[in-house]
Image (cartoon, helix red, strand yellow):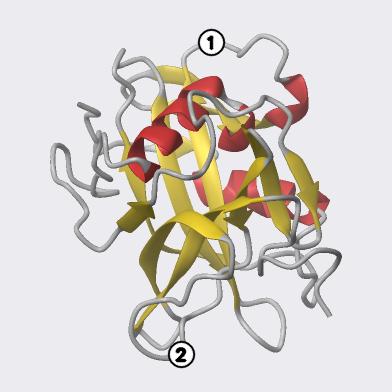
Amino acid sequence: MAVIHRTVLEPTKLELLAAWLPTRPWYVPGAGGPELTKAGGFRLDDPQGEVGIEFMAVTDTAGDDAVTYLVPLTYRGAPLAGAEHALVGTMEHGVLGRRWAYDGCHDPVLRTQLLALLRGRVLAQDQNTSDTPDREVTRSYDGDGGDLADLAAGAVDDREGTRLSAGRGSTLFLHRVLRPAPDGPPSLPPGTNGHVAGSWRTPDGSRARGLFVVLRSGPGDRYGRTGRPA
């Protein structure tokens, strides 16, 4: 079980992300640098109790229209070998000392636990409270998504989001720019074999809900089509 410490981080997570987000191909530039606020998210437990796993939703209000991003992060007490390219930054934790924060798509612990969540083997945990499931996070898996024993290490970013190979021709797609579902539960793209959905807070204080992760068969885009979205 992950323990949530009430302490100080220097720099803060939002300060790290303000420098890192503009380097991503899916970042939507605003007027000047990002102006970030925490909008929600959830955590997953590392069975070994060594790695912090957090799926953060952060909203950038720098542009004319606010943009909310999904940022999976892992926090480690030592550098992750071979993941220098995925380092978001380091920070000093008031209890745990120096922590290395990584883009979690490149961290094998997060990838393993994300698949476990998708398959219903673990529960999403509240972002701010220890040992408390997050009931707003929903998931599905129809059992036809190929061999989900592991996700390939090579996460690929483009302007649409992040893709990871899930084996046997399946792809796990992470929505980096979150889009609210118009009404009710989010609709799933054609060819979807599984999903993770959740909620976040909008700038006006209301709650939005949408897809975080989609598992699909074949190399189509996040809508289940082949080629690029129109």
User: Is residue 24 visible in this depiction of the protein?
Assistant: no
Residue 172 vs 207, above or below: the answer is above
Q: Position of residue 29 (x, y in %)?
A: 80, 70
Q: Nearer the viewer, residue 21 or 141?
A: 141
Q: Nearer the viewer, residue 101 or 164?
A: 164
Disc assigned to residue 182: 2
Q: Position of residue 11 (x, y in %)?
A: 55, 39
**Residue drawn at 24 percent across, 49 percent down:** 126
Q: In this view, does 211 lie to the left or right of 44?
A: right
For label 1, the SS is loop
Q: Which of labels 2 and 1 is toward the front? A: 2
**Residue that protrudes farthest toward the front in the picture:** 144
Image quadrant holding the C terminus, namely: bottom right
Which quadrant holds residue 51?
A: top left
Q: How crowded is mark 1: few (under 14 residues within 10 Å), some or many (20 or more)?
A: few
Residue 88 vs 133, above or below: the answer is above
Q: Which amino acid type is shown beneath numbered disc 2?
A: Pro
Q: Tell me if label 2 and label 1 are in contact, CB under 8 Å.
A: no
User: Is residue 133 visible in this depiction of the protein?
Assistant: yes
Q: Where is residue 88 in the image (x, y as percent from the top left)?
A: 66, 35
**Residue drawn at 25 percent across, 48 percent down:** 128
Q: Which amino acid type is shown beneath numbered disc 1?
A: Ala
Q: How crowded is mark 2: few (under 14 residues within 10 Å), some or many (20 or more)?
A: few
Residue 118 vs 87, above or below: the answer is below
Which quadrant holds residue 184?
A: bottom left
Which quadrant holds residue 31?
A: bottom right
For label 2, the SS is loop
Disc assigned to residue 78: 1
Q: Where is residue 7 in the image (x, y as percent from the top left)?
A: 30, 36
Q: Which of marks 2 and 1 is nearer the N terminus?
A: 1
Tell me how many marks there are: 2
